[in-house]
C-alpha cells in the first residue's frame, strides 16, 4: 500500500541525528512539517535492541530514517566486527522494530558496496563486491534491513557526502588551502559528490511516499576528487597550486573504489541536482573547517 503524506504530517524517528546527514534530515523533515524525534547516539545506541524497541514504541513513528553508522572507513579495517555489529546487525534491529510497529525504514548505504572496477555508472541491479571492511559492513546492513523489514524499507545508496554538520572533503580542502601553497589531490577516483542538504530532502520524500527497495541517490554528474577540489577553489578564489595525485601513493588502510558513479534505474527515485549545485549550496552556508 502506498501512503502519501502530502496533506499531512508524519511522525519520523531519526537515529544518528547528531551526524552530518542526521542534522540535515531533521531540518528537512521539520521544514516539510513533519513531527520529528531526532535521537543522537547518546540518546539511543542502536546496538541495544531493547532500547531501539522502546524508542520506537515511544515515538510511534510512521517512518524511521537510520542515519547512525560506523563511518570511519579506514578504522573499520582493524575493527570489522565492531563496524559490522553497528552497520549490519544494529541496522537490522532498527528495521525490525520499525516494521513491527508498522513504520517504514529508510536505511543509508554506500557506493563502497561495489568493487569499483566498472566503467559505466552502477545501477541498483549491478552486482555488489565490496573490497573494504566498511563496504562489507554496509552490505550486511542492506541484507539485515531487507530481512527484518520485508516490503517496508528503502535502502538508499549514496556517496561522497559533504554537509554543514560534519567533517568532509570540501571543508578539508578549504582548510588546507589556508595552510599550504601546494596541494596534491587524487585524480584517479571518480564518483558523485553529494550535498547532504540535497540528499536529506530526497530521503524525506522517500519516507513520505514509501518508495521502497534499493535506490541510488547521489549528486548528478560525476568527477574526481581533484575536480571537486578544483571547483571548490575556483568558487572560493582560494590561491593554492593543485597537483594531480594517485590513490596508490596515499597508502591508506582501506581500498577506495576507483569508480563508483551511481545512477538509478528506477523512474520514481528522486533525482538530486548536479554536484556543482550542491557544492555552491554548501559554500553559500559559509561553513569553515
Ligand atoms: N559521509 C559519506 O561520504 C557517506 C557516503 C555514503 C554513505 N554514507 C552513509 O550515510 C549515513 C550518514 O553518514 P554521515 O556522513 O552523516 O556520518 P556521521 O556524520 O559519522 O554520522 C553518523 C552518526 O552515527 C552515530 N553513531 C555512531 N554509533 C552509533 C550507535 N551505536 N548508535 C547510534 N548512533 C551512532 C554517530 O555518533 P558519534 O559521532 O557520537 O559517534 C554519528 O552522529 C551513514 O549510513 C553512512 O554510511 C555516508
Image: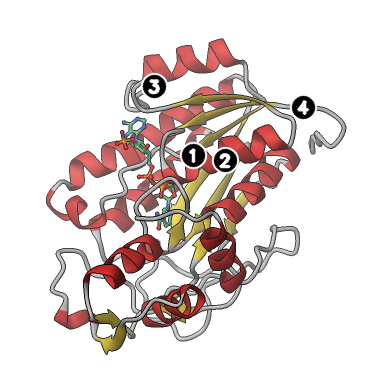
Q: Establish whether ligand 1 lies closer than 8 Å to the Cβ of label 1.
A: yes
Assign the C terminus to one quadrant of the image.
bottom left
Distance from disc 1 to disc 4, alpha carbons, whole Å, reads 19 Å
Q: Are marks 1 and 4 in contact (CB under 8 Å)?
A: no
Q: Establish whether ligand 1 lies closer than 8 Å to the Cβ of label 3.
A: yes
Q: Name the residue rendered at 20%, 64% in the picture.
A: 254
- Select label 3 or label 2 by which is in front: 2
Q: Which mark is residue 25?
A: 2
Decide which of tag 3 and tag 2 comes sooner along the chain: 2
Decide which of tag 1 and tag 3 comes sooner along the chain: 1
Distance from disc 3 to disc 2, alpha carbons, whole Å, reads 17 Å
Residue for badge 1: 22
Residue for badge 3: 44
Q: Name the residue rendered at 21%, 39% in the picture.
A: 82
Residue 223: x and y, percent?
Answer: 47, 80
Helix or strand or loop: what does disc 2 sit on? helix
Question: Does residue 36 appear to the left or right of 167 in the view shown?
Answer: right
Q: Are marks 2 and 1 in contact (CB under 8 Å)?
A: yes
Helix or strand or loop: what does disc 4 sit on? loop
Distance from disc 4 to disc 2, alpha carbons, whole Å, reads 15 Å
Residue for badge 4: 9
Q: In this rendering, does residue 11 appear at all?
A: yes
- How many marks the image carries: the answer is 4
Residue 23: x and y, percent?
Answer: 50, 39
- Select label 1 or label 3 by which is in front: 1
Question: Does residue 118 appear to the left or right of 75 in the view shown?
Answer: right
Q: Are marks 1 and 3 in contact (CB under 8 Å)?
A: no
Amino acid at each position: 500500500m502506498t501512503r502519501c503524506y502530502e496533506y499531512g504530517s508524519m511522525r519520523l524517528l531519526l537515529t544518528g541525528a547528531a551526524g552530518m546527514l542526521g542534522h540535515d534530515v531533521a531540518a528537512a523533515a521539520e521544514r516539510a512539517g513533519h513531527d520529528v524525534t531526532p535521537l543522537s547516539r547518546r540518546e539511543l545506541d542502536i546496538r541495544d535492541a531493547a532500547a531501539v524497541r522502546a524508542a520506537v514504541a515511544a515515538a510511534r513513528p510512521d517512518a524511521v530514517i537510520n542515519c547512525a553508522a560506523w563511518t570511519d572507513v579506514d578504522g573499520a579495517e582493524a575493527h570489522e566486527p565492531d563496524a559490522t555489529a553497528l552497520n549490519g546487525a544494529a541496522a537490522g534491529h532498527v528495521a525490525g522494530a520499525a516494521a513491527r510497529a508498522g513504520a517504514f525504514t529508510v536505511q543509508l548505504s554506500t557506493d563502497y558496496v561495489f568493487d569499483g572496477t566498472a566503467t559505466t555508472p552502477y545501477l541498483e541491479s549491478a552486482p555488489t563486491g565490496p573490497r573494504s571492511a566498511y563496504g562489507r559492513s554496509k552490505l550486511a546492513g542492506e541484507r539485515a534491513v531487507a530481512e527484518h523489514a520485508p516490503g517496508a524499507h528503502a535502502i538508499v545508496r549514496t556517496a561522497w557526502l559533504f554537509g554543514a554538520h560534519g567533517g568532509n572533503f570540501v571543508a578539508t580542502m578549504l582548510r588546507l588551502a589556508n595552510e599550504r601553497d601546494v596541494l596534491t589531490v587524487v585524480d584517479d577516483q571518480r564518483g558523485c559528490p553529494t550535498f547532504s542538504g540535497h540528499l536529506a530532502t530526497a530521503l524525506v520524500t522517500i519516507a513520505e511516499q514509501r518508495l521502497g527497495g534499493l535506490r541510488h541517490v547521489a549528486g548528478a554528474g560525476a568527477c574526481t576528487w581533484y575536480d571537486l577540489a578544483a571547483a571548490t577553489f575556483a568558487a572560493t578564489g582560494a590561491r593554492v597550486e593543485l597537483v594531480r595525485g594517485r590513490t596508490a601513493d596515499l597508502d591508506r588502510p582501506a581500498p577506495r573504489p576507483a569508480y563508483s558513479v551511481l545512477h538509478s534505474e528506477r523512474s520514481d527515485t528522486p533525482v538530486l541536482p548536479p554536484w556543482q549545485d550542491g557544492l555552491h549550496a554548501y559554500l553559500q552556508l559559509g561553513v569553515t573547517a
